[in-house]
Amino acid sequence: MRDVMASIEGEYRRYRGVGDGVLRQLSDADLLTRAGGNGNSIAMLVAHMSGNLASRFSEFLNSDGEKPWRDREGEFAVRDVTRDEVMQSWNHGWGVLFDALAGLTDADLARTVTIRGTPMSVVEALHRSLSHASYHVGQMVVIGRLCRGAEWSWLSIPPGGSAAYNQDPKFERATAHAAGLAEQSNERTT
């Protein structure tokens, strides 16, 4: 059975979709813009998220989630990267995650994994990771909005749109939200 796992995976897909929506709207220069002048850029956040997801979910059930090959400090290094490099990193991290999730069932949620030598249940590790992903995707949204200003295309209910949305709340489920973001993207690129 995969009821709980499908729900968790759906939420990851929701945040992946929001992040995709941010990345589609930004110029190459925007990806390198640092929040507040010396904060993280979206490129840094993508490198960090990718490193985290790849480390946590490579051999998820069988090895510590903090792999010796991960360079967490390097994920936040200031560097020039291309859009292609940012997108490769983004896609890699999410790919490792979704490959690992595909093999999990609800019965696996009670199993134990370790992160930095600390044992925790699979469900705890997944909730921790999902919170981490949503936190950083939220940062991406804020930086993206600052970069785009009035040209920003809303990825959630736009200001003044609550009443209309409440008449047709079609994106309350994560999978529907992710599909709606993909549809919006296709409309903008065609």
Image: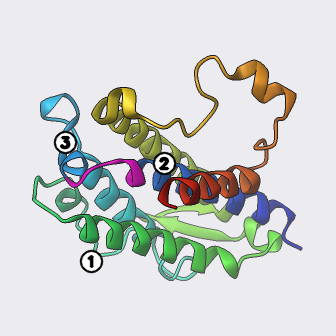
Quarter of the image where one finds residue 46? bottom left
Tell me residue 131's x, y (percent). Answer: 55, 46
Q: Nearer the viewer, mark 3 or mark 2?
A: 3
Name which residue type carries label 2.
His
Q: Give the number of the disc on residue 52.
A: none
Say few, some or many: other residues with alpha carbon within 10 Å of mark 2 (under 14 / 14 to 19 / 20 or more).
some
Mark-to-mark CA distance, 1 and 3? 27 Å
- Location of residue 52 in the rendering, given as x and y in whole percent from the top left corner: 39, 63
User: Which residue is label 3 attached to?
Assistant: 33
Element carrying mark 1: loop
Q: Earlier in the sequence, mark 2 or mark 1?
A: 1
Question: Furthest-right residue in view?
Answer: 1
Q: Residue at x 29, y 48 (%)?
A: 42
Say whether residue 159 is magenta. Answer: no
- Give the magenta part as a residue range: 23-28
For the residue pair 154 and 54, the one nearer the viewer reads as: 154
Q: Which residue is mark 2?
A: 132
Q: Nearer the viewer, mark 1 or mark 3?
A: 3
Q: Residue at the far left: name it.
A: 79
Name the residue: 68% across, 52% down: 180
Circle 1 residue: 69
Crowd rating for badge 3 (residues with CA inside 10 Å; few <14, some 14–19, many 20+): many
